[in-house]
Amino acid sequence: MRLGFYNLQGGTGKTTVAINLAYYLSEKAKTIYIDCDLYAGTSGILFGYENDPHNLNSYLSGNSSLDEVIHTYNNLAIIPSDVSPDAFNADMDFERFAEMVDILEETYDIIIFDLPPNITEGNLLFSSIDKKLINKMIIVGEDSIPGIVNTLKTQELLTAIGIGVTGTIINKYRGIVDFEDILDNVIALLPYDKKVEEQWALNKPVVEIKSKFGRELIYLAEDLAHVYIEKDLAAMRALKLAKELMGLAEDEE
Ligand SMILES: Nc1ncnc2c1ncn2[C@@H]1O[C@H](COP(=O)(O)OP(=O)(O)OP(=O)(O)O)[C@@H](O)[C@H]1O
Ligand SMILES: [Mg+2]
């Protein structure tokens, strides 16, 4: 399953939510997190890969192999983006991105895409030639007045380009805006919590630090796993099994 985290607005908590959900889900299913923010990604800072030359940028420039760019944190597989200023100088081939995702899908049940803000219709991350690269999106919106506007705009954009929205997460929730009255697809309210900042210094996901945010995120992860993911995983396992059986049948012929 390919699951993206997006908002047109920057800084809403896409990376925080995507990494932590991915980390939690990796205990249940084979999960890979991809930092698609090629120029300003921060997952490399969280996991301490600042000096590691292998990342999504180096893969897209042909300087690293797929194996080299896949890092791990416990059960979670991670493809970080380049944290260094070199991120801007590389000559990247974006066709390699779609190919890479197809290869990863053979190994991983869940592929989490942490998207940069401000990407729109024409961007490769949203569409490839004949099929959508990401078929399900979770919008991470921020509890603020501009947060509502941008979350509504993001919803319109995704609907217009035919990407299904699994739900909206309101992050940094402090009771500023009554989102549930305005949006009908809110799947979680994640509290504003100072502890979230500690993850960057401690180099570990917030769900490993005792915090209000982590507790709420785990509830959300459990819900997502039950409602959305298990159904998809069951369908995927059935498909894999069917393919294997067909392979066996062909071998026997
Ligand atoms: N619930 C929260 N409570 C407090 N701080 C938070 C919360 N969620 C995220 N933050 C902080 O907000 C900042 C932005 O978070 P994050 O990098 O996850 O956002 P983003 O949407 O991925 O940003 P960008 O658009 O730049 O990719 C970080 O410093 C993060 O620690
Ligand atoms: Mg981010």
Image (cartoon, rainbow, N blue to C red):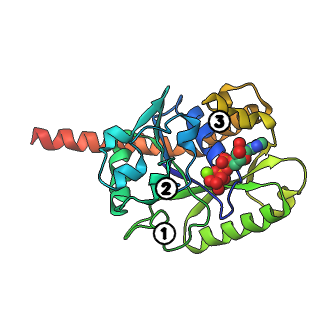
The image quadrant where one finds the C terminus is top left
Residue drawn at x 62%, y 37% as measured from the top left: 20
Look at the image and tell me whether residue 230 can be seen.
Answer: no
Tag 2–tag 3 contact (CB < 8 Å): no
Q: Which mark is residue 123?
A: 1
Residue drawn at x 31%, y 45% as measured from the top left: 64
Q: Which mark is residue 70?
A: none
Horizontal relation, residue 127 to residue 103: left or right? right
Picture layout, residue 159 above or below residue 73: below
Q: Position of residue 36 (x, y in %)?
A: 50, 53
Q: Position of residue 25 (x, y in %)?
A: 56, 35
**Mark whose residue sits in front, 3 or 1:** 3
Q: Which residue is mark 3?
A: 200
Secondary element at image label 3:
helix
Q: Position of residue 217 (x, y in %)?
A: 71, 37
Alpha carbon separation for disc pair 1 and 2: 13 Å
34 or 42: nearer the viewer: 42
Horizontal relation, residue 243 to residue 88: left or right? left
Three-letter amino acid code at the position of disc 2? Leu
Q: Which residue is mark 2?
A: 38
79 or 3: nearer the viewer: 79
Alpha carbon separation for disc pair 2 and 3: 19 Å
**Mark whose residue sits in front, 1 or 2:** 2
Three-letter amino acid code at the position of disc 3? Trp
177 or 96: nearer the viewer: 96
Picture layout, residue 194 above or below residue 210: below
Q: Position of residue 183 (x, y in %)?
A: 79, 62
Crowding at dot 2, Cα within 10 Å, few <14 / some 14-19 / many 20+, comes out as: many
Alpha carbon separation for disc pair 3 and 1: 29 Å
Three-letter amino acid code at the position of disc 1? Asn
Residue drawn at x 50%, y 46% as measured from the top left: 232
Crowding at dot 3, Cα within 10 Å, few <14 / some 14-19 / many 20+, comes out as: some
